[in-house]
Amino acid sequence: MLAYCLRRAIYAVPTMIGVALVCFVLMHIAPGDPLVAILPPDASADLQAQLRELYGLNRSLPEQFAMWVWRALHGDLGVSIASNRAVAGEVLSAVGNTLRIALVAAFIGFAFGCLFGLLAGYFRGTWIDRLASICSVLGVSVPHYWLGMVMVILFSSQLMWLPATGAGPSGSSDWAWDWAHLQFLLLPALTMSVIPMGIIARTVRALVADILEQEFIVGLRAKGLTHTGVLRHMVKNAAPTALAVLGLQLGYLLGGSILIETVFSWPGAGLLLNTAIFQRDLPLLQGTILVLALFFVVLNLLVDVLQTLLDPRIARS
């Protein structure tokens, strides 16, 4: 097990290097000058040269990449061009806010996705299967940004049950797990949970339908095992694949929250990315994408380890 975990950790290193390289190249081949956000229209050539030297933009691309990677390894992601604040502090604060809604959304999506998938697979061909399948297809098909606006209109404007925007009554810096703050989290978390719920439900439904047709299930029923006992064995066999899908969906929630966080004005990584894109703030863009990619790689590593604990055959293969 230890050798397997070390091998997976070593495989993650070239992945991170590749992500850093692709992120850096894409940011620098995009059109536009990152200094436009802070330079006045009548800026002199001397001022432009000073700022380019300050941010290292006067160096060659290989030199800029080497400097950025070296500083990132020491925890320094640079300084934001637009706000002149440390990128690491802004990114970590925003990612912490995104993690809150992503974890709640993943829990809701995994719980209801597994429930719908188990019901659809166990009672396949019945009205329960059709109803659960319709819910999962709708969850995957409905645009989540449109669903977010509908939920704001319904629960905030019409019913006035939940706040529409923000991350707390007094901002997101003093977050607490109480109702005063949780009510700001519910709408974005519910909106984010719809897509993973549909994907997990369809995956679990296919797994359960396949497992029920295998010979060991027939043998368990022939031995007189109850429905609860059969369900326990079925869940144990479906858990590794369902866990892998959950890990991927949690990673997608972290990186794909830009539209939802913009709709709900949630101060997370998605809203930070949106702001950095419009301001063409290269250090902030690179730092945010790198941290999100690091979370994605770490999540996949943790999922691989959990899969191995649930199914030792993976480590032996």
Image (cartoon, rainbow, N blue to C red):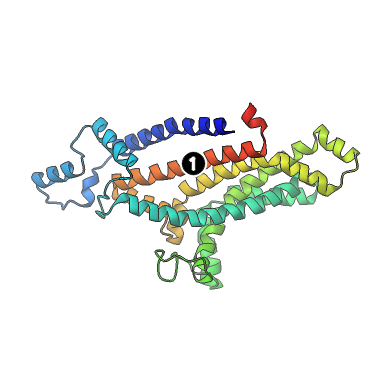
Residue placed most toward the observer, 255 or 173: 173
* Residue 55: image location, x then y, percent: 21, 44
Q: Residues within 10 Å of mark 1 (few under 14, many from 20)?
A: some
Which part of the image, by quadrant, shows the N terminus?
top right
* Quarter of the view holding residue 316: top right
Query: Residue at 13% of width from left, 42% of height from top?
Result: 49
Q: Which residue is mark 1?
A: 298
**For numbered disc 1, what is the local secondary structure?**
helix
The answer to whether residue 17 is visible is: yes
The image position of residue 309, as x and y in percent, is: 64, 39
Q: From the viewer's perspective, is residue 194 above or below residue 49?
A: below
Q: Is residue 69 left or right of residue 204?
A: left
Does the image show residue 30? no
Please give left or right for residue 257 compared with residue 274 in the image: right
| Kind of residue at badge 1 | Val
The percent coordinates of residue 36 (x first, y second) are 21, 48
Q: Residue furthest bottom?
A: 160
Q: Residue at x 86, y 47 (%)?
A: 226
**Residue, x 26% and y 30% (percent of image)?**
62
Q: Number of marks in the image? A: 1
The C terminus: image quadrant: top right
Residue furthest to the front in view is: 2
Q: How far across and down, in percent of the image, does residue 75 sit?
A: 33, 45
Rendered image quadrant of residue 168 = bottom left
- Judged from this view, the residue extending furthest toward the top is 317
